[in-house]
Image (tube, rainbow, N blue to C red):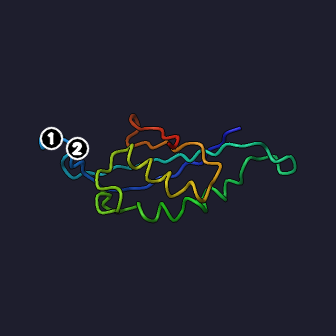
Amino acid sequence: MEIWKQFTFEAAHLLPNVPEDHKCHRLHGHSYSVRVYVEGDLDPQLGWVTDFADIKKAYQPIRQELDHYYLNDIGGLENPTAENIARWIWERLQPRLPNLSKIEIGETCTSGCVYRGN
């Protein structure tokens, strides 16, 4: 079974590798949504895969690194595309949540990506 918990963060960025006349080359911000998916068997006694509070606890330090920051200044996010943000979050969250199955990033309400690890 797979469960998810959703989070948000606000951040500014620009995409340094797109042409200078591309709108994303200019400084701008997003209200990002992040869904953290965890997969596993149901605990027969508790009736859940993982406590949602454990997902929140594992993600909270990552959110604190991202929320209300300029993403390009964060190590590993010099080119902060949705895809790179998803991978960056995965690399930090997977050791804390070994049954992590995917990360979903919503950059806008109509655009995003899903990352399932390497």
Q: Which residue is mark 1?
A: 19
Q: Identify the residue shown where x is 87% and y is 50%.
A: 45
Note whether 57 is above or below 7 in the view shown: below
Note whether 29 is above or below 116 in the view shown: below
* Quadrant into which the N terminus falls: top right
Residue 100 horizontal/vertical position (percent):
61, 48
Q: CA distance from mark 2 to mark 1?
A: 9 Å
> Farthest residue toward the top?
110
Q: Which residue is mark 2?
A: 24
42 relative to 17 in the view: left or right: right
Q: Give the secondary structure at mark 1.
A: loop
29 relative to 58 in the view: left or right: left
Viewer-side label of 2, 1: 1
68 relative to 62 in the view: left or right: left
Of 52 and 62, the residue lying toward us = 62
Q: Identify the residue shown where x is 52% and y is 40%.
A: 116
Q: Give the secondary structure at mark 2.
A: helix
Note whether 118 is above or below 66 in the view shown: above
Of 23 and 83, the residue lying toward us = 83
Query: What amino acid is found at the position of numbered circle 1 in the picture?
Result: Pro
Sequence-wise, which precedes: disc 2 or disc 1?
1
Q: Quadrant of residue 4?
A: top right
> Farthest residue toward the front?
118
Of 91 and 38, the residue lying toward us = 91
Q: Quadrant of residue 17?
A: top left
